């Protein structure tokens, strides 16, 4: 009887440890997937910026990109990337502040939502080599991207906040 009691206590301990491990795996898997997605998405965007003909900060209104003018602080919600000198060939990364989504659209009108729960309103900025935000569209600008994510508390999961930041320089000068 004593051996059966000790065996059942050990069995319950092993079962509790396994359940705790599965819960931690599930919690960490969400974070790891978010980090993996962020790396892949920003790597693709960085490759496009490295090899593009021109890049400009602005905003997207009614599916039309409007670039910021010289004299305006070069920080906004969208980034136009033109891989060639042809102005009809472009990609726009944008944050829709209304529904807190991060997306990508191209010249053919294909729009893809890449992420949701974006909390910052101006993730794209053009900076100089020292990290100061520019007030003109210089040829030697560094594009800085800062995405802030907030995932509210869900059933058995705590709320999470992520921040992803990177700076990318255009390699090819037009």
Image (cartoon, rainbow, N blue to C red):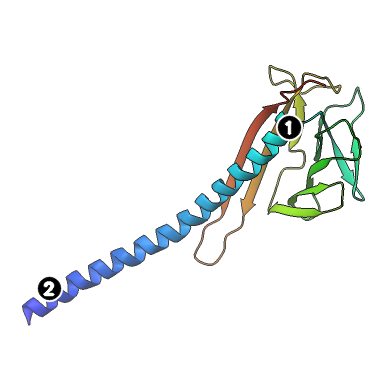
Residue at x 77% of width, y 38% of height: 122
Q: Which residue is mark 2?
A: 6
> Observer-nearest residue: 117 or 114?
114
Q: Is residue 102 left or right of residue 1?
A: right
Q: Which residue is mark 1?
A: 49
> Observer-nearest residue: 57 or 14?
57
The local crowd at label 2, few if under 14, some if 14 to 19, many if 20 or more residues have their Cα within 10 Å, is few
Q: Is residue 88 left or right of residue 173?
A: right
Q: Residue furthest left?
A: 2
- Which secondary structure, mark 1? helix
- Which secondary structure, mark 2? helix
**In the displayed structure, would residue 34 be above or below residue 82?**
below
Kindly indicate whether the residue at mark 1 contacts the one at mark 2 (C-beta within 8 angstroms).
Answer: no
Q: Earlier in the sequence, mark 2 or mark 1?
A: 2
Front disc: 2 or 1: 1
Q: Is residue 96 visible?
A: no
């Amino acid at each position: 009887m004593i051996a059966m009691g000790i065996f059942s206590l050990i069995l319950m301990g092993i079962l509790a440890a396994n359940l705790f491990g599965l819960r931690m795996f599930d919690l960490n898997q969400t974070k790891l997937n978010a980090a993996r997605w962020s790396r892949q998405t920003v790597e693709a965007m960085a490759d496009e910026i490295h090899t593009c003909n021109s890049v400009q900060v602005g905003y997207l209104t009614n599916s039309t990109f409007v670039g910021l003018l010289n004299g305006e602080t070069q920080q906004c919600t969208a980034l136009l990337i033109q891989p060639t000198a042809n102005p009809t060939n472009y990609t726009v990364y944008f944050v829709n502040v209304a529904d807190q989504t991060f997306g990508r659209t191209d010249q053919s009108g294909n729009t893809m939502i890449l992420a949701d729960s974006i909390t910052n309103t101006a993730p794209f900025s053009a900076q100089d080599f020292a990290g100061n935000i520019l007030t003109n569209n210089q040829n030697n600008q560094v594009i800085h991207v800062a995405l802030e994510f907030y995932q509210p508390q869900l059933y058995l999961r705590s709320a999470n906040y992520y921040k992803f930041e990177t700076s990318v320089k255009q390699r090819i000068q037009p």
